[in-house]
Amino acid sequence: MAEQLSTNHLLGIKDLTPQDIQLIFETADTFKEVINRPIKKVPSLRDITIANIFFENSTRTRISFELAEKRLSADVLNFSASSSSVNKGETLLDTVNNILAMKVDMVVMRHPAPGAPHYLSKRIKANVVNAGDGTHEHPTQALLDAFSMREQLGDLGGKKIAIFGDILHSRVALSNIFCLQKLGAEVTVCGPPTLIPKFIHKLGVKVSHNVRETLQWCDVANILRIQLERQDIKFFPSLREYSQHFGINKGLLDSLKKEIVIMHPGPINRGVEITSDVADSDHSIILQQVENGVAVRMAVLFLLAAKRG
Ligand code: NCD
């Protein structure tokens, strides 16, 4: 097994090798054990300061990074664009350079513009972790999703994973596709034609518009939210119609008579892409995903810090 990551930043899954992903998983296994101990903290990042800078809304991801940092004993500072000088016209680079002047070692960033963390990583000394850049990538979500699937199914080689919903606007979809393929899984994306990018088959995924058939095929259903905040035109007639044709409900799952792992990165739109009786069922590992998120983010931060030398 590799002992170091091949990269100094986590910008996207696209840049990781399969060995990087395995190293992150094996490190996360150890941290998962740590966070289940009575004393959930280790001193690994005691001399590291991390800034979480969020230019877009977030609940889970921001809290998960902050907890991961605190469990590793890093010093943490939180910045959110809605209450900052960004509203006074400051550029991204100026904002971040001001934060770095206060001796910050790592930056965890969420931004609505695809490529924003890549741009920063080329201009600043700190390690950059992408916590979601627009509709592009969300690498730690894909890592925690794959880590959670591996807990259920073991090695993901040859496993069948389906991603349902708003593939067009979802950074989780793209990062999941890259991650699962690097681990040898087969991926199908399923949703209405208007919410599936035209050339997605070029990534080597299968495309389906039939929810029942795709559920019948897969071992895991990763169900994504309709990203209403990113839709400037109408991609489907109404939420009611979407849920009738593409929503996943208990009746449909029961009629398949098979074991299937249900996942969702959150936030859930209950009754739209997934009904409550599915989200809260025994098939669902949605809250395990959240728990694993902390361990996986601890692993990423720890391994990036180790590269600082
Ligand atoms: C995802 C995101 O922000 O991309 N959520 C998350 O990080 N848990 C998915 C979403 O917003 O639907």
Image (tube, rainbow, N blue to C red):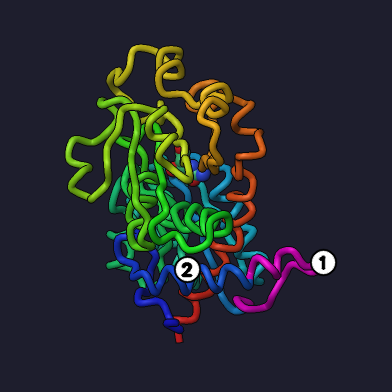
Q: Above or below — where is 207 with respect to 106?
A: above
Instruction: Tell me, for residue 106, which label it has, or none.
Output: 2
Please provide the residue range marked out in magenta. 31-46
Residue at (33%, 39%) from the top-left corner? 189
Residue at (45%, 13%) from the top-left corner? 240
Q: Secondary structure at mark 1?
A: loop
In x, y percent, where is residue 247? 46, 24
Outermost residue, front side: 257
Left of 236 or right of it: where is 202?
Answer: left
In three-dimensional space, the C-alpha distance between marks 1 and 2, rounded to whole angstroms, equals 28 Å
User: Within the magenta stretch, is there residue 154?
Assistant: no
Q: Quadrant of the N terminus?
A: bottom left
Q: What main secondary structure does the magenta stretch of the protein show?
A: loop
Crowd tier of the residue under label 1, counting other residues whose Cα lies within 10 Å: few below 14, some 14–19, many 20 or above: few
Left of 227 or right of it: where is 62?
Answer: right
Residue at (31%, 47%) from the top-left corner? 136
13, 107: nearer the viewer: 13
Residue picked out by circle 1? 38
23, 309: nearer the viewer: 23
Left of 129 or right of it: where is 30?
Answer: right
* Amino acid at pointer 1: Pro
Residue 139 seen in the figure:
yes
In x, y percent, where is residue 193? 26, 26
